[in-house]
Image: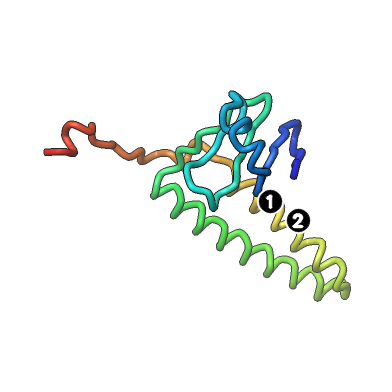
Amino acid sequence: MTIYCMGLTLHIITKPPSSQTQNLRSHPQVKHTQSKNLPLISLRGRKPVVVQMDWQGQKVAEQLMQILLLVSAVIAFITGYFVGSFQMMILVYAGGVVLTALMVVPNWPFFNRHPLNWLDPAEADR
């Protein structure tokens, strides 16, 4: 299966034929997993983006999402009620969902204010 999104090609191969398995695993652009249950994923042309959102950032993103969706639902209901249009209510709520996705989905810098300090492997063994 091939997925094209924003100029990025993502190839997902769930069950390759056994003759092609070794060729795929040795290919330099194919990132593979060790488990046989997980799909092989290849990002062609770009390096994978490392997401570094910390735990506090995840909590803030979750709370922001809930607040924005609730506010957009209330605004959509009030707009739909006074205009008298169910379609207008759905459009206003859809705009709120898009706005919420733009605010919460990207890894904005304010989600990374509390980075985790990982131990060195030598210190963890002690």
The answer to whether residue 23 is left or right of residue 9 is left
Name the residue rendered at 54%, 53% in the picture.
Answer: 37
Other-residue count near label 1 (Cα within 10 Å), few / some / many at <14 / 14–19 / ≥20: some
Instruction: Please give the residue where the numbered disc 2 appears in the rendered image.
Output: 95
Q: Quadrant of the C terminus?
A: top left
Residue at the front extreme? 19
Name the residue rendered at 64%, 26% in the picture.
Answer: 46
Amino acid type assigned to the residue bearing label 1 in the image:
Leu
Other-residue count near label 2 (Cα within 10 Å), few / some / many at <14 / 14–19 / ≥20: some
Q: Position of residue 29 (x, y in %)?
A: 62, 26
Above/below status of 12 relative to 95:
above
Give the camera-side residue of 106 and 17: 17
Q: Quadrant of the N terminus?
A: top right
Secondary structure type for disc 1:
helix
Instruction: Please give the residue where the numbered disc 1 appears in the rendered image.
Output: 99
Give the camera-side residue of 17 and 39: 17
Q: Position of residue 118 (x, y in %)?
A: 28, 37
Residue at the left extreme? 126
Name the residue rendered at 87%, 68% in the picture.
Answer: 87
Amino acid type assigned to the residue bearing label 2 in the image:
Gly
Q: Which quadrant of the figure has residue 40?
A: top right
Q: Which quadrant of the figure has residue 113?
A: top left
Q: Which quadrant of the figure has residue 125?
A: top left
Secondary structure type for disc 2:
helix
The answer to whether residue 105 is left or right of residue 120 is right
Give the camera-side residue of 47 and 35: 35
The answer to whether residue 31 is left or right of residue 112 is right
Q: Position of residue 3 (x, y in %)?
A: 75, 42
Name the residue rendered at 75%, 56% in the picture.
Answer: 95
**Circle number at residue 49:** none
Give the camera-side residue of 2 and 98: 2
Instruction: Please say if the residues under marks 1 and 2 sit with CB atoms less than 8 Å apart.
Output: yes
